[in-house]
Amino acid sequence: MELPPNAPCDTERARAHLAPFSTMTDGELRDAKQLVGLARACDPDADPDRLAAGLFVAESVNVIDRALTAGCVPFAVLTDARWERAAAPLLQRIRAVAPDAPVVVAPADEVRAITGYRETRGPLAAFHRPAEPSLDTLLAEAHRVAVLEDVTNYTNIGAIFRSAAALNVDAVLLTPRCHDPLFRRASRVSMGTVFQVPWARIGTGDDWTRDGLPLLHDAGFTTVALALSDDSVSIADPRLKAADKLALVLGTEGDGLGNGTIAACDLTARIPMAHGVDSLNVAAASAVAFWETRWEG
């Protein structure tokens, strides 16, 4: 194990820095009260509120590299010794940008014991959560945005971000009940694109459309609900691609969008299906929709 050059190498502090990988849940990594305790355990003499913005865990060389490139600041690193050689340039980069972040290299069985993960796909790095971009700024500068309504499957969230990055979507907006795109599985599935595509929360309370849709309309967006409906237009309808500012609203797997959301959007669109298939997985549907409505201005 390595600790910063001037840090006391005592077991308690080492264990504290490993807590994001072991004893803390995703929710606790965003809980300011929990993080005060972690900050004090890491260094009793430092500011107890220094972790108040939260932490997240990234997995794999590719994801960690993109988090670093986006300006995220490392808190600690844990890697299976098997990955050390391949990750050497990345670990060197982390040491350069965050010399106070402990780097722990351990045998595979110890990493499993610490994390509870049967297998990891590269190094694990805990980062300080970055500040969320201004929603107003995102809307002012964007031409294509995706709105995820209550999507709670981390694999789908990650896949949607990957498609958004590849197909030139300017931002992803998340309703209050949508899960965290910085969760380890979501960021890994996204291949780190959650650090490349700007995202922000939209709406408040149980009905995000009440204050969220007016924000989109005021910013000049045509809002399009992707849903199966008798009055749906084809996703290939020329009006959609011609729109200067378009917000595609995608619903959760299975239930889809709420009826109130569909009614409140300007248009409803569907992807034409063959062979009796009624719909695609939301991640696959997002890729089709992003491609068909891509902005080429």
Image (tube, rainbow, N blue to C red):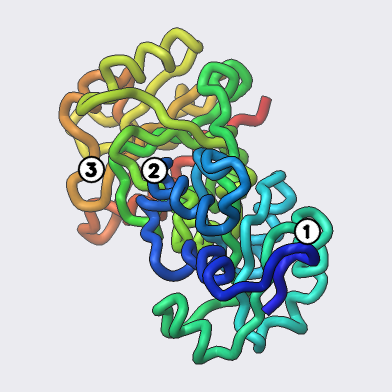
**Label 2 SS:** helix
Q: Residue extending furthest top?
A: 218
Query: Crowdedness of circle 2 by 10 Å Cα count: few (<14), some, many (20+)?
Result: some
Q: Between tags 2 and 3, which lies in front?
A: 2
Disc 3 residue type (three-letter): Gly
Query: Which residue is pictured at 52% across the width and 78% down the height?
Result: 120
The residue pinned by badge 3 equals: 256
Q: Residue extending furthest front?
A: 45
Disc 1 residue type (three-letter): Pro
The residue pinned by badge 2 equals: 33
N-term-proximal mark, 1 vs 2: 2
Q: Is residue 85 left or right of residue 243?
A: right
Q: Is residue 249 left or right of residue 11?
A: left
Is residue 291 visible to the viewer in this orientation of the structure? no
Q: Position of residue 44 (x, y in %)?
A: 56, 52
The residue pinned by badge 1 equals: 99
Query: Which residue is pictured at 48% across the width and 32% down the height?
Result: 200
Q: Position of residue 32 (x, y in %)?
A: 42, 41
Query: Which residue is pictured at 20% across the width and 28% down the height?
Result: 206
Q: Find residue 291 and name its label.
A: none
**Label 3 SS:** loop
Q: Is residue 94 left or right of residue 152?
A: right
Disc 2 residue type (three-letter): Lys
Query: Crowdedness of circle 3 by 10 Å Cα count: few (<14), some, many (20+)?
Result: some
Spatial CA distance of label 1 from label 2 is: 26 Å
Spatial CA distance of label 2 from label 3 is: 35 Å
For residue 230, above or below residue 166: above
Is residue 272 visible to the viewer in this orientation of the structure? yes
- Front position in the image: 276 or 103: 103
